[in-house]
Image (cartoon, rainbow, N blue to C red):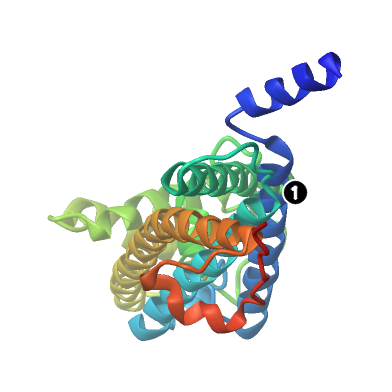
Amino acid sequence: MSMEAVTRSDEEGRYLQWTPVIAGAIGGTALSFIFLTFAVAVGLAVSSTSPTWRDTSAALAILSGIYLIIQAVVSFGFGGYIAGRLRRPFGASAAEEVETRDGLHGLAAWALAVLIGAALATVIGASTLNRSSPARSTPNATAAEPLLSYELDRLFRSARRPPNVDLTSERAEAGRILLTSSSHNGVSGDDRTYLIQQVGSATGLSPADSERRVDSAIANSKTAIARSRRSTVILAFSLAAATLLGAVAAWAAACAGGRHRDGAPLPEWMEHANRFERRRIVVHS
C-alpha cells in the first residue's frame, strides 16, 4: 500500500502527462495531413512550381490561405480535445486548476504537432532538393531558374541553334539580370543592351527581334516575381495566423475535452456544444 501511495503521489506531482499530449499531437498532425492532401488535390495550394500557377488570381491565393487557417484550427482543436479528454485527473482540485491543466495539455499537444509538422516539411523539402540537385549542380546555376525558367526558355528559344549547345552560363547570367527587374530602378540600360546582344548571338535573331524578346522577358519576369512575392506573403501570413489560432483552438478544445471527461457542463461561450455531449449522471451519496 505504501508503494502504491508513493506511485500515486508521484503521478499527482507530474503536472504534464505525456501520453495524452503525444496522442493529441499525432491525431492533430494526421488530420492536418488529410486536409492538406485534399487541398492539394482540388488545387487549393498557396504556392506551386508550375509556371501557369503565377497566372492564378489573388482571390484564389487568399482562399487557399483561409483554408489553411481553417484546417489548422480544426486539426489543432481535434488534437487538443484528445489531450484534454485523455488526461487523468488526480485528486480533488478547483475547477480553475483543472481547466488550466487541461488547457496546458492541449497547448503542449499543439506545440508538439507544430514541431512534427515542421520536421516533416523539412524532410520533404530536403528530399525534393536532393532529387533536383544533380540537374542544378553546375557552378553557373542561379536562383532565377526555379522562378524564371519559363521566361529564360522563351528568351533563348531558337529553331536554328545547333544541337548540344550549352547555354547554362548565358541562362544563369540572364537570370541574374532579370531578377533586377523587380527592383526600384529595374533593369539598367547597360544590362538590357547586353541581354539583346546575348539573345541575338545565341538565337540568330535580328537586333529588332532580339530587343522585342528581351523587353517581353523583362516585363514577364517583373510580373512573375511580383506574383511570387504576393504568394509568399500570403503563405507566411496564413501560416502565422493558422499557428496562432491553432494554439487558441487547442487550448479551448482541451478544456472542452476535460469537461466532457468529468461530466461537467461547458462554459457559456462553449455551451452550444453541449448538445453533442452525452451527459453523465453523477450520484452523490
In the picture of the structure, the residue carrying the numbered disc 1 is 131
**Quadrant showing the C terminus:** bottom right
Relative to 17, 208 lies left or right: left
Q: Position of residue 46 (x, y in %)?
A: 48, 70
Please name whichever residue, 129 or 145, is drawn nearer the observer in this view of the structure: 129
Which residue occupies 58% across, 30% down? 15
Which residue occupies 57% across, 40% down? 92
Q: Residue furthest front?
A: 285
User: Quick check: 124 above or below 138?
Assistant: below
User: Quick check: 78 above or below 120?
Assistant: below
Q: Position of residue 28 (x, y in %)?
A: 65, 58
Residue 236 quadrant: bottom left
**Quadrant showing the N terminus:** top right
Q: Residue furthest left?
A: 185
Please name whichever residue, 31 or 217, is drawn nearer the observer in this view of the structure: 31
- Name the amino acid, label 1: Arg
Q: Is residue 42 visible?
A: yes
Which residue occupies 43% across, 72% down? 270
Please, what secondary structure does the residue beneath circle 1 have?
Answer: helix
Q: Position of residue 251 (x, y in %)?
A: 47, 53
Q: Is residue 126 visible?
A: no
Q: Position of residue 23 (x, y in %)?
A: 73, 49
Please name whichever residue, 176 or 271, is drawn nearer the observer in this view of the structure: 271
Relative to 73, 8 lies left or right: right
Relative to 142, 227 lies left or right: left
Residue 130 quadrant: top right
Which residue occupies 66% across, 56% down? 85
User: Quick check: 258 above or below 1?
Assistant: below
